[in-house]
Image (tube, rainbow, N blue to C red):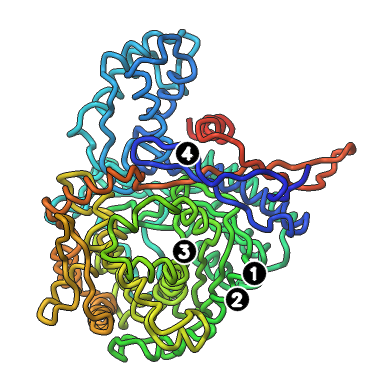
Amino acid sequence: MNGDINERPFVYTDERFSDLQLLRYRLDNFGELTLRQKRYVFCLSQATLFGRDITFDQFGKYNLKIRKVLETIYINYNGDRETSDFKALVVYLKRVWFSSGIYHHYGCDKFIPEFSKDFFINAILSLDTSCFPLGGYGNASEICEELLPVIFDPDLLSVKVNKKDGEDLVKTSACNFYDGVSQNEVENYYLSIKDVEDKEPLSYGLNTTVVKENGKIKEETWYLEGKYGAAIKQIIYWLKEALKFAENEKQKNIINALIRYYQTGDLREFNNYCIEWVGDNDSHVDFINGFIEVYDDPLGLKGTWEGLVEYLDVKGTERTKLISENAQWFEDNSPIDPKFKKQKVNGVSARVICAAMLGGGEYPSTAIGINLPNADWIRAAHGSKSITISNIISAYNEAAKGNGFTDEFVIDESTKQMIKEYGDICDVIHTDLHECLGHGSGRLLEGVDPDALKAYGNTIEETRADLFGLYYAADEKLVELGLVPNKKAYKSEYYTYMMNGLLTQLARIQKGNNIEEAHMRNRALIAHWCYEKGKADNVVELVKRNNKTYVKINSYEQLRNLFATLLAEIQRIKSEGDYEAARDIVERYGIKVDLTLHEEILERYHKLGIPPYKGFINPVLTPVTDKDGNVTDIAIDHSESYEHQMLRYSKEYATLI
């Protein structure tokens, strides 16, 4: 028995429920890693999985309790498991597992149970008393009293992240980053403690909960001796184990810096960790572990815990290496105001990797590309590191084969053929440009607060990176570098992007809702802005054929010019910290949904039977030992079911319940 993926049958797709489909991802060429590298991956994977409870708690105050109660019912229920109520409870539990809580992982709305309140009460009351207390949650009656309103009242804690303009985003968001404070109090608190003269500023608020105690605002830090300490203790343990198998001194320095940060909670140590991490471009195995992305905070301050373990896709990295080596050319030729350009692009590193383990905010749903660190001053002084996750992209592509999506939504046969021929490579190139260069391009003007755009900052940043990728996807430089096959290939990406932004991403939104998620707002903003601004020249049309709406692009060249104009404005907004302009452009183009068009897209998408969201089941990594107890390999097992994996994780990696 060994770790070579090719010795076991592999199936990409697994089960479906609600609006979700579970996939698997191959660990391509894992068998080619050295034993030391495999053991390094294993230890880092354990550190990744031990952060799971943190993310659940961050996404809602009651998430961990609800998960535990649902799991207890599921495991111990002695009633009829074939009733519609019990089956609905199982689906609800699976959704809670997927979203790390009771809120949709993308739309942020609270799930509405399809089982009755009476069934839930009776299910809890029917449990043997040995099941209680559930991690100190009290008896059955106390649990019902606390959790019933949270689960069944649609108006109580109704949305995880509220971004509606004009509302108190802190008080109306259910994410567990703030307690007893208002948006105004939080913003004023951080204004009062920021050092505006600091040339190496901290990521203020990244690793804390803001609370009010005796009328005074304070922060509870997430570190070894503070909040989430039980989980962080296990993460540190496995990071120390990983040190034993590090490939080089750089990796050891990175891990030691991260451990110091976890031990102290000091954001200066986090800066040191980021600098160490971004400086390692040579290691075959790499990882992300910590409080990183801020999309789950309505104010864009608090870092969701996430983990990712990765190893190099050598062939794919040859492509991104070409891009990163030409980073200065792309920056110099960007269609933005010269005063917003970087005079010298530092340390842009781009790799194609295979994911080996997903955790926290990257599990079960994960990104296909990541660019870090987020601090603008670190990017400017030390560079950035980008990854494109090839085995995740491959899994998505395999799942999409033959699903009928292209036939339903693409306007004509010639466009379908163009997408079939060039779609995959151009989509990957756009991701590479977005992550490798887009996020790292441009600069803030002197004295501009990195948080100046507040709740609109995440959307503006994703818009900026996407536009950078779209603009350059059509550049002859890519043909010259051999990254795309010819000058017309980019049209496939332009078409699918506009189709998604104007039409098909609406399938991910519940009827009657507006767009809430930052990446979806970004795509809508770009597509609708270009559609409106190009009307005079008929650049992009929405046409009806057989009562179905399609995108028609009449001039790809003019569309590129529109992307360039919008990129220049978005970069200006970012560089100058122009909050009012950010607010205006996002509210005008990125949020509102045409109800009639939305209903049409939902109906057409539903007929295809394609779940609009997908996530992943992790492989099981297990050390293999010889008769003397020596580890000889790390075996890969892809046979674990979603249900078994989630229940196992709740048992083996429980730290906060």
Density class for disc 2 (Cα within 10 Å; few <14, some 14-19, many ≥20) is: few
Q: Which residue is mark 3?
A: 370
> Which amino acid is tagged 2?
Glu
Q: CA distance from mark 3 to mark 1?
A: 18 Å
Reply above or below: 383 against 424: below
Disc number at residue 314?
1
Query: To which residue does mark 4 refer?
Result: 53
Which residue is at a point 53% across and 73% down the rendered structure image? 350
Work out whether 220 lies above or below 491.
above
Q: Amino acid at mark 1?
A: Val
Image disc number at residue 318? 2
Q: CA distance from mark 1 to mark 2?
A: 7 Å
Q: Which one is closest to the eye, mark 4 or mark 2?
A: 2
Query: Mark 2 and mark 1 in contact (Cβ < 8 Å)?
Result: yes
- Give the mark nearer the N terminus: 3 vs 1: 1
Q: CA distance from mark 2 to mark 3?
A: 18 Å
Ranked by sequence position, the earlier of labels 4 and 1 is 4
